[in-house]
Amino acid sequence: MLLMVIGFMLSGPSAVADSSRCTPSGCAGQARFVSLGEHLYVDDKLADGHSAVAVYWLEGGTGPFEVWNPNGNGSTVDHNLELAEGSWIYYYVCLGEYGLRSILSGTCSAGVTDYA
Amino acid sequence: MPERPVNRRIFVLGGLAAAGTAALPGWTGASTPAPRSVTPNAIRYPFELGVASGDPTPDGVVLWTRLAPAPLNTDGHGGMPNADVTVDWEVAGDQSFASVVASGSTVARYADAHSVHVEPVGLAPDREYFYRFRADGHISPAGRTRTAPPAGAMPAQLRFAFGSCQHWEEGWYHAHRGITADRPDLVLFLGDYLYENPSSALSTVRGYVITSEADTLAEYRHRYAQHRTDPQLQAAHAVAPWLVVFDDHEVENNWNSTNQTAARREAAFRAFYENMPLRRSSLPVGSSIPLYRRIQWGALARFHMLDTRQYRNAQAPTGSCSTMRDPARTITGGTQEQWLLAALAQQTARWDFLGQQVFFAQRDDDNLRSTCLTNSTDAWDGYTASRDRIAAGWVQRGVRNPVVLTGDVHRHWAADLRLDYYDHSAPIIGSELVTTSITSSGAGGSSPPSQTWMSNNPHIRYWQDQRGYVLATLTPAQLTAEFKIVTPSVLEPNPANVTIRTDRRFALLDGQRGLQNA
């Protein structure tokens, strides 16, 4: 049976990212932000037993929020945000253990600010 | 692990802070906060940290902003390029900026984290004004400010709010929403604007980007910037001029004159100055900052804004009577003490407020002179000779209405002051109003002092462990203090589910001593 889960795709979207970040040492996890429609994509790019997780803050004094991709190598989670035009998002990507919602220390990328 | 905030924006900018979104005269063609058009190869909308004003005089006020289009970038420069930027400013008598009364340009320097401190002069006394900035074609939100009454004039009323201790992670800034709604003439912030501590894993509603302890210039700058992304804090800054002092956490918990490196002080003081509406007279010099100062409000009030951190001796060991009572010890330093006492001898205002950090009144567990079982040796209890010199000083000088305003302790307290607290029949010589925290200690709910403790400290009149602030209404005849609390708690994110109400009201009458229920 094919389960259709909103926000989960087996392959990456065609939209071009306006910014992206990779986890250190080989980009096992990647986060990409596309301003058009305000999508934050989280890619798992390595069969390493870990999940990819994007961590982000928003204008308005809120965060961190976490977007997990527990679906394995080659998968992408599309986190569709609703942001005011011109507002900012600050994010980075890490590896983690989805079951415990635990981010692995030393696996996080540098952060980046992008705009809706 | 606690639930993280819901992924939706529940806050909106306060009315004043959003004023820049309207179509305003002058500066036409520039972008306003929404929509935020971006010119290619130019700076993005840089006023993400809002605007502020402070330290009013009869003819001026300091105006502040800091350019940061990407406020959470961890280098502390907020996404600004390594270049200095010209910033225009203007002050108007009306919110639509139809009557601009002062304007000019200044330079936001990369070396100063693109902070701007403008000190317009020549404004009319006792007047409401509005101000805004422009940089690279972008216009800031508008702020409301006001000048002080002229020297010698007796205004009919002054409304001021005071707050302290706004731990970013431990609650939502509903108290700032309340301050904004009150539209006071002044806001006093009595310290712990931020906390240098590492991020806490428990009881948090939101989190730092940099989770380690802040101890470098970049980290302090970043932490200020993260605080200033809060729309309620921005709105409270935009609604009135602030008088700010720091306490300990702007540097490190319980710091004193002996236990910090010069490098850390320099970094902390510099970041504090860069992010506060302080005058150039408060500009740090290396590892020191001239922070204590006086703000006169006509013939009605003086605010002696004290610095009880930078010059204090090290805290006494708990229970060490000999150290706590050592007459050579000081919490203010000798120079500041003499500065204060000299001013108190020149009574130019009906009410004298000591705006400062830590608990002034005695809090003693057993009321025995032999034990010194105080709540905190970090407070004035740990420096009793210093307290005695100042309290006796205002008594000897015949100060008409001395009132101490305090933060630090994350609780509302109200207390009468005595020269000898062990003698419960000793005359009352003044009063102290202690504001609870804006957010620090979160939901609260601790046990109140016991009946025994209260009977040992009968000068203590009130205690409340909820978050909030104090709103004071001052007239020549009376000070009314409303102790505001946020219910059910600052852990609730949605303002629609939060009530800000007066929990207790006290009055002080001109020329009389002692708190009155009101």
Image (spheres, rainbow, N blue to C red):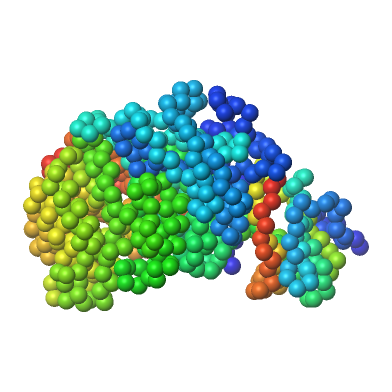
Based on the displayed image, in which of its 4 quarters is residue B54 positioned?
top left
Rendered location of residue B198, percent (x, y): 50, 68
* Residue ID at (17%, 39%): B348
Which residue extends farthest right?
A: A1
Q: Could you tell me if residue B341 is visible in this image?
A: yes
Residue at horizontal 55 percent and vertical 33 percent from the top: B20
Tell me: A100 left or right of B328: right
Q: Position of residue B338 (x, y in %)?
A: 17, 56
Whether residue A55 sits left or right of residue A47 in the image: it is left
Figure quadrant of the N terminus of chain B: bottom right
Q: Position of residue B248 (x, y in %)?
A: 37, 63
Q: Quadrant of the C terminus of chain B?
A: top left
Which one is in front, A102 or A38?
A38
Number of numbered discs on residues: 0
Depth check: give the residue in front, B219 or B270.
B270
Locate residue B121: give its quadrant: top left
Residue A98: horizontal and vertical position, in percent? 71, 70
Residue B5 visible to an observer of this rendering: no
In the depicted view, which residue is nearer to us: B324 or B441?
Answer: B324
Q: Please report the residue visible at 56 percent of the width from the left and 64 percent of the height from the top.
A: B210
Q: Is residue B446 left or right of residue B106?
A: left
Task: Using the rendered view, name the quadrant where residue B29 is placed.
Answer: top right
Which residue shows up at 65% across the image and 48% down it?
A88
Camera-side residue: B450 or B391? B391
